[in-house]
Image (cartoon, grey):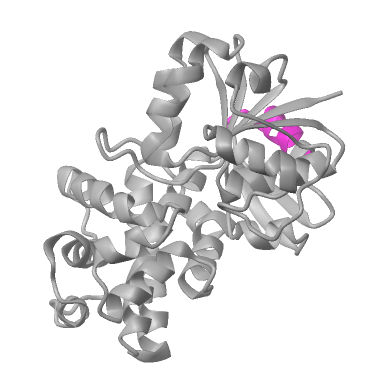
């Protein structure tokens, strides 16, 4: 039987592990917190990150990575991006040679300004991993409810990509293969910044016109940086670009949109982050992408204003005004 090891017991990792267990695979989920493992075994649900969702009885959970990773054929990684290096570093000795690693995490590492593909490549350099990136418009809760979802799987090895496409797809979770793994992972990371921006705008009651403008100009900003970093422009028009952007900017299940909404309504970032156990990847990604854009000389005005609001205390309304009063340009 095919065995999959899922590393990371947040809402996304749990949802994917549960879905794959439902396909009949041997699936083991690594969760670092022993108390959460005990609770899942007793209650059959992840009450911390995916409450009120009954998990497949065949899903194995453990805080012992050796137990989870032993004899696995595929490794699906859903560790938050800013903890990826530390988390994978703890278990890198448990990977076999040439492991197939599917990354479902979205972000840019703050300390190095590198995407997850580079981080994983560096951590597992001695293992020579085969890498793929899974991204697209996909709220974990809706996937856990079996609602129709379509995503992209980026893999430079086309044959492996098609194999993974078939492995992961279900009758409600449709996977499109894409050889541009860089574009797939960058779209998934960068859209979280724009989601914070649209949340701020909505929190200020600036209306649908402003939201549509931020989404559209946000996509242009994402593609501009993404192409410079090696992604293909067409990828940003697809599920992992436009699709994920629209979902995250408009859906109230989006943690990044919620951060923006609360900022627009007057809460501080510290207040917002203290209220949630889940990670809003866009906060740290805003910081890392702002530094990266300045370093390589890519103009990212929305990212700059979100950064000023998040980390420099700028009034959210003034941030929007700064965007509206920039020098006029050709589209």
* Magenta highlight range: 156-166
Instruction: Specify the quadrant of the image occupied by residue 195.
Output: bottom left
* Left or right for 183, reference 40: left
Magenta stretch: helix, strand or loop mostly: helix
| Image location (x, y in percent) of residue 105 | 50, 42
Instruction: Specify the quadrant of the image occupied by residue 3.
Output: top right
Q: Residue at x 26, y 46 (%)?
A: 288
Instruction: Name the residue nearer the viewer: 284 or 125.
Output: 284
Say if the magenta span includes residue 159.
yes
Q: Is residue 174 visible?
A: yes
Say if the magenta span includes residue 293.
no
| Image location (x, y in percent) of residue 29 | 66, 33
| Image location (x, y in percent) of residue 125 | 44, 14
Instruction: Name the residue nearer the viewer: 48 or 245.
Output: 48
* Left or right for 246, reference 70: left
Q: Residue at x 26, y 67 (%)?
A: 302
Task: State whether residue 112 is above or below residue 196.
Answer: above
* Left or right for 203, reference 330: right
* Left or right for 314, reference 70: left
Q: Residue at x 37, y 49 (%)?
A: 226
Instruction: Name the residue nearer the viewer: 25 or 118.
Output: 25
């Amino acid at each position: 039987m095919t065995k999959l090891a899922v590393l990371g017991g947040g809402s996304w990792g749990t949802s994917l592990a549960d879905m794959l267990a439902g396909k009949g695979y041997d699936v083991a989920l690594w969760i670092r917190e022993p108390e959460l493992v005990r609770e899942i075994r007793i209650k059959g649900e992840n009450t911390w990150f995916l409450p009120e969702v009954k998990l497949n009885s065949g899903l194995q959970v453990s805080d012992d990575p050796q137990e989870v990773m032993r004899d696995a054929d595929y490794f699906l990684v859903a560790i938050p991006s800013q903890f990826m290096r530390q988390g994978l570093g703890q278990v890198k000795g448990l990977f076999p040679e040439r492991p197939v690693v599917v990354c479902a995490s979205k972000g840019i590492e703050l300390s190095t300004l590198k995407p997850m593909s580079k981080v994983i490549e560096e951590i597992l350099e001695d293992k020579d991993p085969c890498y793929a990136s899974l991204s697209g418009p996909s709220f974990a809760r809706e996937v856990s409810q079996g609602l129709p979802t379509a995503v992209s799987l980026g893999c430079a090895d086309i044959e492996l990509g098609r194999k993974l496409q078939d492995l992961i797809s279900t009758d409600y979770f449709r996977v499109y293969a894409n050889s541009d793994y860089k574009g797939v992972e960058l779209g998934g990371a960068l859209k979280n910044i724009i989601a914070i921006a649209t949340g701020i705008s909505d929190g200020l009651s600036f209306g649908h016109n402003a939201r549509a403008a931020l989404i559209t100009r946000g996509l242009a900003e994402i593609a501009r940086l993404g192409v410079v970093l090696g992604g293909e422009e067409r990828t940003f028009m697809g599920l992992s670009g436009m699709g994920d952007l629209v979902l995250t900017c408009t859906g109230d299940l989006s943690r990044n949109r919620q951060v923006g909404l609360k900022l627009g309504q007057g809460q501080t970032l510290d207040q917002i982050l203290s209220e949630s156990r889940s990670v809003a990847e866009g906060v740290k990604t805003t910081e890392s992408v702002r530094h990266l854009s300045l370093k390589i000389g890519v103009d990212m005005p929305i990212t700059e204003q979100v950064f000023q609001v998040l980390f420099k205390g700028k009034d959210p309304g003034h941030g929007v005004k700064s965007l509206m009063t920039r020098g006029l340009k050709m589209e």
